[in-house]
Image: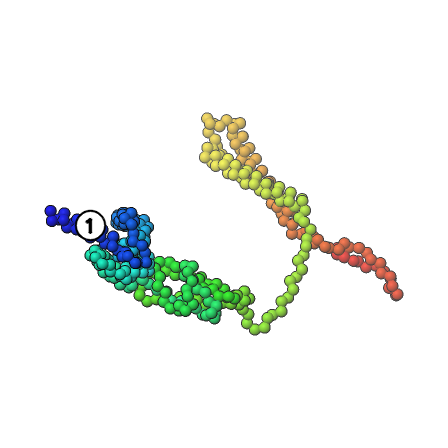
Amino acid sequence: MASSRTRLALLASVALGLTVALAPGAAQAEPSAADRQTARTLLIEGRNKLAAGDAKGALVDFNAAHAIMQVPTTGLDLARAQVALGLLVEGRATAHEVTLLPVRPREPEAFAEARAEAADLSTALEARIPSLRLRIQGAPEELIVARVDGEPIPRVALGQPRKLNPGSHEVTVEAGGFVTERREITLKDAEVAPVEVEVVLVPVQASEVPVTKGPLAPQTPAAPREERVPVPTWAWVAGGAGLAGLAASVAFAVDHAAARAKIDRECPGSVCDRREYDVERMQALRSRWNWSLGLSVTLGVAGAAGIGAAVGGVVLRPQMKSERAALVPLVGPGVQGVAWSGVF
């Protein structure tokens, strides 16, 4: 009986606290009965999700409940869900806000306990949150724009430790007329000392012009490229025929090796078993041996010759702008005769 009365008293206390959490004259209107019931349901569902490992779902529920009620219990649950997701910075901010919520008249004891737990959580998180310090050189400070994960850092805070959640972060530093620098930084939970990141900005012109020592050496003009006539058609034909000949030569060489292996296996010492081989079969096997060997050698030689002719046609083709040789008459005072003009 006493236990039932205790539970009823506790439920009544929480209900009373939700009812009087926002006193008349506060900045936010007092939540309605429907709002209080919605917030109570969201809290229960959020706690169940958090216990089951669904911190993201719990965060959505707690955020909605706290937006409705703005009381210490909803704020504490919201901070716990943020910490479970690794959002230590946001969790500490929420826990600190809970400690600043004003004490309402006749509020339940659960609210006071939530404020105390939020204060302990805020202190514990302060020791876990890592920080990042940028050391930027090479550009005037008034031109520098630094961002962490796309969020700009106020210029007055450049060089100061910046509190961030554990994990990977992208640092971007840019300035007008300088090359933009990017860094990937990983911060660890409870990393006490700030992580120092050195960034040296380089002017755009300096990054594009190669650095040279001493006077520039005069550049010699490139030799004019010799233009040659197109590869003649016969060279392409000879090359194709040569490749085909080599391929056929390889095929017949394989067939010859197979015939030889069969003779060595079934006719050792070139003596075949007359029960298996008659005269015609022996002659056919020997003819296959000789025929495949001859074709392999012949086609190989022909293929090599074709490829050689094709290579010669490509390499030895004349220049495009060669002058034609001709006899030029020379006529002048005291000079008579002929001379060669052009190449031959």
In the image shown, does 169 or 157 lie closer to the viewer?
157
Determine the residue positioned at 28% across, 57% down: 24
* Residue found at the far left of this picture: 1
Secondary element at image label 1 = helix
**Which residue position is annotated with label 1?**
11
Residue 57: image location, x then y, percent = 32, 49
Look at 64% across and 44% down and name the residue there.
236
Residue 206, compared with residue 301, is above or below; it is below
Q: Inspect this view and state whether residue 172 appears.
A: yes
142 vs 104, nearest the viewer? 104
Task: Measuring from the top left, give residue 340's x and y in whole percent.
Answer: 79, 58
Q: Please tell me which residue lies in front, 256 or 6.
A: 6
List x then y, in percent, for residue 110. 21, 55
Q: Quarter-wise, where is residue 300 in the image?
A: top right
Q: Residue at x 61, y 42 (%)?
A: 240
The scheme the figure's colours follow is rainbow
Indicate left or right for 154 with 237 as reference. Answer: left
- The residue drawn where x is 67% and y is 44% is 234
- Residue 82 position within the rendered picture, expressed as x and y whole percent measured from the top left: 31, 55
The quarter of the displayed image where residue 93 is located: bottom left
Q: Is residue 242 left or right of residue 336?
A: left
